[in-house]
Image (cartoon, rainbow, N blue to C red):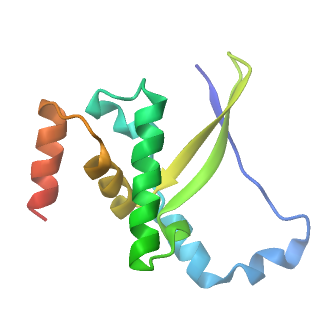
Amino acid sequence: MKIVNISRYPSCKHQFSSWGLEDVFYNSKLTYSIGQLSFTGNHSTAMIMEEALQKSLQVCYLLGINSRHHFKKVFIYDSQLEELRIDWLMSRNGFNLMVMQMPTINEKMARWLWELSDL
C-alpha cells in the first residue's frame, strides 16, 4: 500500500518566515502518529482513538499548554484505496499522553505504561 502525505505550503514565497522559529522547532518534534498506537490492540477502533485524542487535547487545555506544539492534524491519501483520511502527528509527550488515555489494557500496553513510569 502506497501512502502519500499531503503537506500544505503557503502560496506566498515569504510566508514561511512569518511562522517563526518556535513553530518550526515544535513541528520538528512531531515524530509519532496514531498509526504507531497499533501496539495497544485498539488501532481498529477509531472511536477509542478519537476519545483518547480528545482527552489528551483537554489535558493540554486545562494545563494551559499549546496543543499545537504536541498534536497536528494531517491528511493522508492512500492511492490504492483512493481514500483521503485524517491522521495526527504527535510529539513524544503527546504520544505518551495518548497512551495513558487509552481505556483498555493488554500486555503491550502495560509494558509501555511501565516504561513511562520509569522516566
Q: Relative to residue 10, is residue 105 drawn left or right? A: left
Q: Relative to residue 87, is residue 36 drawn left or right? A: left
Q: Relative to residue 87, is residue 54 drawn left or right? A: left
- Residue 32: tell me if it is visible: no
Spot occupied by residue 94 in the image (x, y as percentages of width and height): 39, 59
State the count of labels.
0
Q: Relative to residue 12, is residue 51 drawn left or right? A: left
- Furthest-top residue in this view: 80
Q: Does 37 sit above or below residue 79?
A: below
Spot occupied by residue 13 in the image (x, y as percentages of width and height): 88, 72
Quadrant in which the N terminus appears: top right
Q: Does 39 sit above or below residue 59?
A: above
Say which of 83 and 7 sits in front.
83
Q: Does 67 sit above or below residue 44?
A: below
Spot occupied by residue 7 in the image (x, y as percentages of width and height): 72, 51
Q: Residue at x 48, y 59 (%)?
A: 30
Spot occupied by residue 5 in the image (x, y as percentages of width and height): 66, 41
- Furthest-right residue in this view: 12
Q: Residue at x 61, y 83 (%)?
A: 21
Location of residue 105 by image quarter:
top left
Q: Residue at x 30, y 55 (%)?
A: 96
- Residue 18: tell me if it is visible: yes
Say which of 32 and 100 sits in front.
100
Q: Residue at x 30, y 42 (%)?
A: 102
Quadrant in which the C terminus appears: bottom left
Say which of 72 and 42 sits in front.
42
